[in-house]
Image (spheres, rainbow, N blue to C red):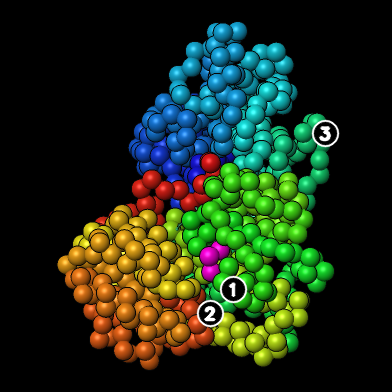
Amino acid sequence: MCGIVGYIGEENATGIIIEGLKKLEYRGYDSSGIALCTKENKLLVRKKKGRIANLEKMIKGEDLTANLGIGHTRWATHGAPSDVNAHPHTDMSGKIAVVHNGIIENFMELKKELTEKHGVEFKSETDTEVVANLIGVCYEEEKDLEAAVYKALKRVRGSYGLGVVCADEPDKLVAARKDSPLIIGLGKRGNFIASDIPAVLKYCRQIYLLENNEMAVIKENDVKIYDADHKEVQREVFNVTWDADAAEKEGYEHFMLKEIHEQPDGIRDTLVRRMDDDGEIVLDGINLTKEDIENFDKVYIVACGTAYHAGLIGKYAIEKLAKISVEVDVASEFRYRDPFIDDKTLFIAISQSGETLDTLAALREAKKKGARVLSVVNVVGSSVARESDDVFYTWAGPEIAVASTKAYTTQLVCMYMIGLYMGRKKGIVSDETYRKYIDELMAVPEKVSKILDQEEKIADIAKKLYTKNGVFYIGRGIDSAVSYEGSLKLKEISYINSFAIAAGELKHGTIALIEQGTLVIAIATQDKLFEKMLSNIKEVKARGAFVMAVAKEGNTAIEEESNEVIYIPQCMDEITPLLSIVPLQLFAYYVARNRGCDIDKPKNLAKSVTVE
Ligand code: F6R
């Protein structure tokens, strides 16, 4: 959620840093700031609550020329969003500035010590100012920034991605990481630090991924990385192959819409890249042998939000294809119920960003208990990926909009592939079943495109319904799992109170809320449950509901019971979620658009949730 950018080089750092911060806006933030070290050994700090545009307005006309600087977009954790709580934070001497992502767990204890022993007077409520002052105190003792940061970090407990500069040493930028991502970009006219690659992509494609407990000293023409014992380590350069343009809107009004439209490609890529010439699934980077798979007696899928909803579908797919019991849990709950996990457990973590702290913490807990950890992740080199035994990358490409769309559908593809792969290795998926699934999956991109062709119709329906206040999503079987995701999409971007429930559960209480004009979105794609869904639709219609249904082409009986119907192409029941979610994403998008919402950056939300 918070973003870090730093630069040292021949150019003026101010513009580069602000531009980099803008590339990270999608992560969500509530204030931004910049600290610059001038050649005259001056430290200039400017920070402002709200959008980066506010900061730009503040510094407009000022001469902020410097070749070294750090910048930050903050998403409040300790202390409310405000100018004073915004980063960078400085030490008491005003020489050292720090930007920080993460949470310092022992900040209260350090704050007390700094106040009582060193007379530090704190200006903000943040844990970061504590770090800045701790480094400041160590700098007094060491008279060297690198040594001071190293010494200070020995005292810190918690997570951090850090960028540190000192007015007395304008030739270097010191960076460190623990449980919060940080990369070093190697440019032609200087070097960079950033919490995310898009921030520096305009200037460099060669990067170093900083590992946990490492720190780095970055100069204009030199980068040195040190391990936890301050021994220099060599790091391979990671070449970024994806295009900076992939992170731009390409003519769409919002990233979310662009990403909805990218789903045919993302699904195809995720699928095709794992298929050999004979149509067999080859899971690159995954070393699950037949023996490993036969050894598992249960699977846990753990994730948050949309990724959790993908896990719900994963349960259906893996149980059916691999005949193994699957439990799905939200990551924030998982750790607190002492789950029964051992070396016979396959733990699957699903995460677009790979940085969601709840998911990461659950993964660590499972690993501690002996589980084999397989992760399904979109961001290459992210923390979840790095801490897993095996990684199954989704090929969705960078997802910028806060509301997840293409990550979800590519995660679903992974779920089917994992189920098929495990079932195949166990010898329980026949050639015929396997072929059928593969053929059906391969046809999905084309079918998603056909649904996208109905965009105008869906936009028209949204135009009629966008003023609704409470919306219910219902479905049976695998459709009920899709209804959760449809409902989440609507509520997070349109702020409409929406609720998803298994259709058969309605009559046990929730139906009391259905009244004249209530919007009910019924997902009715399962042939074997179709009649039952029609009955549920009748129940809500009888109480005055306005029903928008999603059904398979040909199941026209639904038109008599519903006010609006959106059809998806025919396909096997088991894979309908890959299709039925698409009209729900578009519907949520157009409802939010009609309501004038900030679609790509909904209020209170961040793209990557790196706090518990
Ligand atoms: C909703 C959404 C969130 C994320 C959740 C997990 O559209 O994006 O619910 O799915 O925060 O994030 P990742 O997948 O990055 O772990």
Mark 2 is on which residue type? Glu
> What's the CA distance linking mark 1 and mark 3?
47 Å
In the displayed structure, would residue 519 be above or below residue 571? above
Nearer the observer, disc 1 or disc 3?
1
Residue 354 in the image, given as x and y percentages of width and height? 60, 53
Q: Residue at x 52, y 59 (%)?
A: 308
Q: Is residue 546 left or right of residue 409?
A: left
In the displayed structure, would residue 61 be above or below residue 345? above
Q: Which residues are magenta?
A: 310-314
In the displayed structure, would residue 443 be above or below residue 333? below
Number of residues whose C-alpha sits closer than 10 Å to that of mark 2, classed few (under 14), some (14–19) or many (20 or more): some
Q: Residue at x 50, y 62 (%)?
A: 309
Nearer the observer, disc 3 or disc 2?
2
**Is the residue marked 3 within 8 Å of ligand 1, measured from its CB?**
no
> In the depicted view, which residue is nearer to us: 121 or 344?
344
Numbered label attached to residue 156: none
| Residue at image mark 3 | 231
**Is the residue marked 1 within 8 Å of ligand 1, measured from its CB?**
no
**Between discs 3 and 2, the one toward the N terminus:** 3
| Residue at image mark 1 | 317
Q: Residue at x 50, y 41 (%)?
A: 2
Could you tell me if residue 197 is visible in this image? no
- Give the farthest residue toward the front: 508
Mark 1 is on which residue type? Ala
Asked if marks 1 and 2 touch (Cβ < 8 Å), the reply is yes
Numbered label attached to residue 574: 2
Look at the image and say whether residue 123 sits in the magenta stretch: no
User: Overall secondary structure of the magenta stretch?
Assistant: helix
> What's the CA distance linking mark 3 and mark 2?
53 Å
> In the depicted view, which residue is nearer to us: 387 or 138?
387
